[in-house]
Amino acid sequence: MTTAQGDEIQDERSVLVVDDEPGHRLMVRAVLEDNGWRVAEAADGGSALRILRSGPAPDVVLLDMRLPDMDGLAILRSLRELRPGLPVVMLTAFGSVGSAVEAMKKGAYDYLTKPADNDELEAVLDKAWQYGQLLRENERLRGEIQSGPEIIGQGPAMRQLEELIEQVAPSEATVLILGESGTGKELVAERLHALSGRKNGTLVKVNCAALPADLLESELFGYVRGAFTGAVKDKPGRFQLAQGGTLFLDEIGELPLQLQPKLLRAIQERVVEPLGSVRSVETDVRIIAATNRDLRQEVREGRFREDLFFRLNVLELRIPPLRERLEDLPILTSYLLRKLGRKNRKEVRTVSPDFLEALSGHDWPGNVRELENVLERALILARADVLTPDLLPAHVREASLDREVLVERETRALQDSPEHSPVLAGPFDSSLDEAERQALVQALEAHDGHRERTADALGISRRTLQYKLKKHGLIRR
């Protein structure tokens, strides 16, 4: 067990409780130790800072806003300098919530009102711990960067994709990468090349959707002098430029039908015929193709040759859209902000929990490319070192409110329903309040009073639930 007297703070699920009220510290210790936490205590800001300077950091700090020797915001600033990625949860009296919100703008992860509700205490600290784990994992990944590009994501879908890439990359087989626009198909192609036996060769890229058919043919296969007006000298095609390396055919589903037989022959027989030439040129390239189209459907509708499809689709890799791997949003956000910070010469140390919650509410039709654009906008507009939801485009902010709006509408519908409506004994808003209160009571009872599960069931954020419980006098003291 760890203490404030200098014992070592363990790395796994550990928390430093900084509070000058011994009774509250004792209550917090009892609750958290029952849930497997290792707890260290400090009665003032100076003791807390000494603990953090003298040994390993805890996973989370639970920090009272008012301490006898230092202001909570001053301690928070010192903590941010000492341990930039350490999640800090503020403790505040109900009447000082504004100060806690200000602390969140300065980098605190979340806040709790005193005396802390047991369920909420455990839920908030657990989320803070998970957030800290994601930040540390991102740091580990950054330290492992070698010659190849990173595949960012630690969810099951991306772990499986990375395993397939590592398994497929050393082979010489043709690979077809499937995924929506913006999912990172080009990045996967770069990763395949970097892990292959051809990594010392050239990775040549061709976007089949960016060039008209006649120009695309000359780009792929090259031409000889005199092949057409303006061809004043021989020009090698992309197949020849990729000799000994990899040729990446992006947006292969856009390849004109009249060019498909020539590409099929180049892949199948490993030779190309430059425009205007009567001689074939041998090639030694590995083909990686990518598309956001359903090529099987294209084959059925006669827009893509079946024999070319099977030649390309020896090994198939599907990249999941971002909406199917929202668990990767924190680590993606952290990675992209570092990348964008270098590009824009502007550092943002962290994001607020509400910022991440707003990101999670959007369905990201543009996938990672859209996320990167949204984050770059927020980074450029940010005046502080913490990103907050007001920096997001309106359509992203509003998407995160859709579920809460839906619950409000359901509450109104419940009030309007004859079999459920109470007798209108007062103003309309009062009956709505009563309907909302009854809905909250029923939801709490259905989930044994557990606030996080109740919020999830209602489709609202934990902070919104907290506000509504206080509004209706349902907070357990």
Image (cartoon, rainbow, N blue to C red):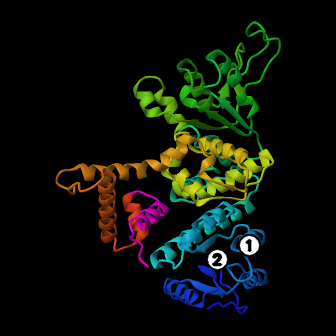
**Residue carrying label 2:** 63
Expressed as whole percent of the image width and height from the top left, the position of residue 256 reads 56, 21
Closest to the observer: 344 or 335? 344
Label 2: few (<14), some or many (≥20) within 10 Å?
many
Q: Which mark is residue 198?
A: none
Residue type at mark 2: give it.
Leu
Disc 1 + disc 2, Cβ < 8 Å: yes
Segment colored magenta:
459-477
Of the residues under marks 1 and 2, which one precedes in the sequence?
A: 2
Q: Quadrant of the C terminus?
A: bottom left
**x 56%, y 83%: residue:** 37
Q: In the image, is 427 to the left or to the right of 469?
A: left
Does the segment drawn in magenta span residue 462?
Answer: yes
The quarter of the rendered structure image containing the N terminus is bottom right
Q: Is residue 282 above or below residue 224?
A: below
Give the image quarter of residue 421: bottom left
Residue 306, image x, y percentages: 46, 29
Q: Secondary structure at mark 2?
A: strand
Between residue 35 and residue 121, name the one nearer to us. Answer: 121
The residue that label 1 is drawn on is: 79
Residue type at numbered disc 1 = Leu
Residue at 53 percent of width and 58 percent of height: 327
Where residue 389 sits: x, y (%)?
59, 51
Residue furthest left as drawn = 419
* Residue 98 appears in the rendering: yes
Q: Is residue 338 magenta?
A: no
Q: Name which residue lies at 75% across and 69% down.
A: 77
